[in-house]
Image (cartoon, rainbow, N blue to C red):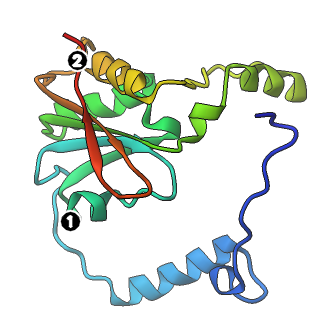
Amino acid sequence: MSISSPQPLPQPTDSAVGTGGTVTDRLVEANRRYAAEFQDPGMDARPVLRVAVVACMDARLDLHEALGLELGDCHTIRNAGGVVTDDVIRSLTISQRALGTRSVVLIHHTGCGLLNLTEDFRHELEDEVGQRPSWAVEAFKDIDADVRQSMQRVRTSPFLLHTEDVRGFVFDVTTGLLREVQPRG
């Protein structure tokens, strides 16, 4: 997948954008309506279920709905691929050490865009903008192997206090079901 010739994106409908404004304008207006009815739930920043969920940023994943979660139940950390990077470890460390989480749930999904990328994406980006990204693409060809790698990164991090309850899953975007990935021996 080349960065200079991206695949066409679905176009937002008029109702999604609103007339005469941008998507961001629509979001700000939705926030005004939300805030008019908002009442402080009086919650603590510590998640009730003491769990952190690491998942892909894919717009098709409604994690709270898919996992039966309510506001305040978990910390949610999302990035491209749901990959455990240094920044995810940073967030998990804060989640555990400062805010009391004990469990980690990792969720990748079928049809992930990282299945179609390679490190060539980084090289093309460098050629285009004249600067090498400091981050890796973290693309993968085998989704189960990447879930296992992510579980291993969490389990072996010296910064995390709680690595006993770390489980990985693949979310099927066509059925909505989770399939658990077992760690290697």
User: Percent x, y for residue 96?
Assistant: 19, 33
Distance of label 1 from label 2 (alpha carbons): 27 Å
For disc 1, the marked residue is 70
Q: Quadrant of the C terminus?
A: top left
Question: In terms of image quadrants, where is residue 100?
Answer: top left
Q: Is residue 62 above or below residue 140?
A: below
- The quarter holding residue 83 reads top left
Q: State left or right for residue 162 relative to residue 59.
A: left
Going from N to C along the chain, the mark reached first, 1 or 2, is: 1
Answer left or right for 62 relative to 99.
Answer: right
Circle 2 is placed at which residue position?
155
Q: Quadrant of the N terminus?
A: top right
Q: Is residue 64 left or right of residue 85?
A: left
Where in the figure is residue 145, as x and y percent of width and height? 39, 21
Q: Viewed as shown, does residue 20 lie left or right of 140? A: right
Q: Residue at x 58, y 32 (%)?
A: 115
Where does residue 6 sit, x and y in percent of width and height? 81, 45
Classify 6 as above or below 185. Answer: below
- In this rendered view, identify the residue nearer to me: 131 or 17: 17
Q: Quadrant of residue 55?
A: top left
Per the image, label 1 sits on a secondary structure element best described as loop
In front of the other: 64 or 45: 64
Dot 2 falls on a residue whose secondary structure is: helix
In percent of the image, x 13 and y 25: which residue is there? Answer: 162
Q: Is residue 107 above or below residue 47?
A: above
The residue depicted at 25 percent of the width and 12 percent of the height is: 156
| Whole-percent x, y for residue 82 in the image | 43, 37
Amino acid on which disc 2 is placed:
Arg
Q: From this view, report whether residue 116 is shown above or below residue 123.
A: below
